[in-house]
Image (tube, grey):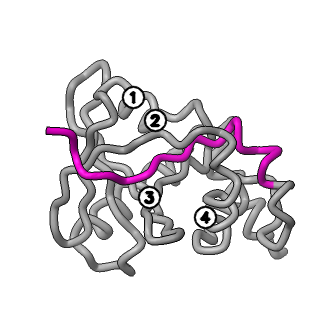
């Protein structure tokens, strides 16, 4: 029996939360991405936990559009890295072989569709979680923009 890729990814994230297998893969991916072993667009975001204060590392896809870099939450609003980031004044560290201290500026909803469209083009693992076909028109991405946080990578504030 063959399982479709989207079904597999949805199985890994029941209710939008990673199961044990997905957590193991996240840990391994974060380790690999941070060391620069994977392609350049695969990064590890590090941000202090809002409750524990302990650094939390999450593997993400860095999306490029019009000379800017973005991070997209494929699982929507209710993910820890988004809440941790907001609690930390949107300051974080990106790792991919080197360390970059950044500030992530939340993108207004009306500006998100093009970034989300680009994200599903470059992030095959995210496609199962964003309910829009990667070839769909921009208007289809506008329908999911309010529930899909997008952050632009900028230099930290002094």
Instruction: Identify the mark at residue 86; answer none if there is no mark.
Output: 1
Q: Position of residue 37 (x, y in %)?
A: 28, 79
Indicate whether residue 127 is drawn in magenta.
Answer: no
Task: Give the residue pinned by disc 2.
Answer: 82
Do callouts 2 and 1 mark residues in contact (Cβ within 8 Å)?
Answer: yes
Q: Position of residue 153 (x, y in %)?
A: 37, 53
- Which quadrant is home to the N terminus? bottom right
Span of residues in magenta: 141-158
Which residue is outermost to the top?
51
**Real-space Cα distance between discs 1 and 3?**
17 Å
The residue sitting at 37% across, 30% down in the picture is 84
Please check the rendered image and state whether residue 146 is part of the magenta-colored stretch, yes or no.
Answer: yes
Q: Is residue 115 left or right of residue 10?
A: left
Question: Alpha-carbon distance for marks 4 and 2?
Answer: 17 Å
| Mark pair 3, 4: CA separation | 11 Å
Q: Is residue 75 left or right of residue 11?
A: left
Q: Earlier in the sequence, mark 1 or mark 4?
A: 1
Label 3 residue SS: strand
Q: Quadrant of residue 148?
A: top right
Res. 143 image quadrant? top right
List the residue tagged with mark 4: 119
Distance from Cα at disc 2 to Cα at disc 1:
6 Å
Report helix, strand or loop for mark 1: helix
Point out which mark residue 60 bears: 3
């Amino acid at each position: 029996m063959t399982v479709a890729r989207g079904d597999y990814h949805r199985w890994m994230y029941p209710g939008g939360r990673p199961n044990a297998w997905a957590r193991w893969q996240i840990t391994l991916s974060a380790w690999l991405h941070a060391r620069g072993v994977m392609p350049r667009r695969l990064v590890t975001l590090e941000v202090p936990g809002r409750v524990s204060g302990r650094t939390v590392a999450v593997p993400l896809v860095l999306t490029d559009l019009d000379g800017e870099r973005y991070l997209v939450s494929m699982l929507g609003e209710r993910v820890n890295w988004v809440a941790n980031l907001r609690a930390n004044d949107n300051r974080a560290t990106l790792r991919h072989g080197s360390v970059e201290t950044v500030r992530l500026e939340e993108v207004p909803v009306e500006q998100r569709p093009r970034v989300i469209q680009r994200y599903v083009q470059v992030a095959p693992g995210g496609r199962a979680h964003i309910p829009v076909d990667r070839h769909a028109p921009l208007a289809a991405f506008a329908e999911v923009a309010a529930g899909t946080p997008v952050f632009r990578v900028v230099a930290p504030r002094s």
